[in-house]
Each structure stands twice: as structure tokens, then as C-alpha cells.
Amino acid sequence: MAKGKVGLGRRGEALAAEALQRRGFTIVAQNWHCPEGEADLIAQRAGEWYFVEVRTRRGTGRGDGEGYGSPEESLTPRKLARMEAVARRYLGEQGEDGAQDTAWHLSFVAVALDRAGRLERVTVYLDPEGDPWEIL
């Protein structure tokens, strides 16, 4: 397995993809790049598109003053704006930007690992402000 931040991110993306697939999503693309940015995962379910940001944190420092905070704390309004721009670009390239009946979502998956790298939780937010699904 790759080490460091990139390896941690790739592991989180793999765990997120597995969690979504278990819930009936089809992963259409991973690490899709365009001038506006990158979508970690692009998925579909029931004819709807999901543009998924995956945030992975290890050793979140729950109460011990160490770590980088929770994955949820790392999702900023600026990142959400970039996700929207990426989603619009992708849909435009797929010929879906003018279709008013095309449903799409900005989604988020939080992956938390303990300091040793063991999985603590995978939490899926179909909408960053909606109710989460916690999946282990």
C-alpha cells in the first residue's frame, strides 16, 4: 500500500467506493480531472448522479489535542463550490447540462481511521447537510 497522504487518500477512496457499491451505487469514474478541479468519485443510482468528495483522516485526536480534526471539519464552502463546478463540467461533457430532469447531488464520504490505520467508520452524506449513513 502507498504511504503518506496520497496513500491515505487512495485507501479512503477505495473504502468509500466499496461502501457506495454496497448501497446500490455504480461507480462511473474515480479521480476525474478537469480545469475546475477533481471529483474523487462519480457515481450513479436510480438514474441520479452523485459527485462524491472523500475525506480521510487518521488519528483524529478525539480529545487528546492531536490530529487534524474530523473528516467532516475539512469540507469547506470553497471546496463545495469547486465540487459544483466540476459536476457541472462533467454533466456538460456528458450532454446532460441542459436536461432539467437530470438529478445530481454533491455528496461526501467521511472515512476515519485510528492512529494504527484501522477503520473506525465510513459515513456517507448524500448531501453534505443531510442525514448521514454510517457504514462500517
Image (cartoon, grey):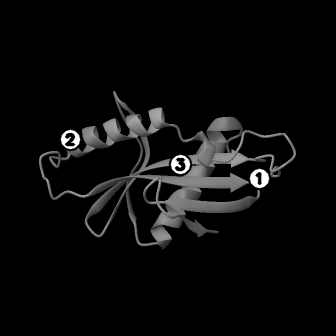
**Residue in the picture at 31% in, 43% down:** 87
Q: Amino acid at mark 2?
A: Glu
Element under disc 2: helix
The alpha-carbon separation of the residues under discs 1 and 3 comes to 16 Å
User: What number is the disc on residue 117?
Assistant: 1
Residue topped by disc 2: 93
Element under disc 3: strand
Pick whichever of labels 1 and 2 is earlier in the sequence: 2
Pick whichever of labels 2 and 3 is earlier in the sequence: 3
Placement of 133 over or under 32, stated as above or below: below
**Residue in the picture at 49% in, 72% down:** 22
In this orientation, does residue 55 appear?
yes
Q: Position of residue 114 (x, y in %)?
A: 78, 54
Mark 3 packing: few (<14 Cα in 10 Å), some, or many (20+)? Answer: many
Q: Position of residue 68 (x, y in %)?
A: 73, 39
Instruction: Work out which quarter of the rendered image holds the C terminus and state it.
Output: bottom right
Pick whichever of labels 1 and 3 is earlier in the sequence: 3
Q: Are marks 2 and 3 in contact (CB under 8 Å)?
A: no
Which residue, as the protein is rendered here, is positioned at the far right? 64
From the viewer's perspective, is the residue at label 2 or at label 3 nearer?
3
Q: Is residue 89 left or right of residue 4?
A: left
Placement of 62 over or under 22, stated as above or below: above
The alpha-carbon separation of the residues under discs 1 and 2 comes to 38 Å
**Residue in the picture at 85% in, 40% down:** 65
Q: Position of residue 17 (x, y in %)?
A: 50, 59
Mark 2 packing: few (<14 Cα in 10 Å), some, or many (20+)? Answer: few
**Residue in the picture at 60% in, 48% down:** 72
Residue topped by disc 3: 54
Q: Position of residue 6 (x, y in %)?
A: 62, 37
Element under disc 1: loop
Residues 85 and 30: in front is: 85
Residues 126 and 7: in front is: 126
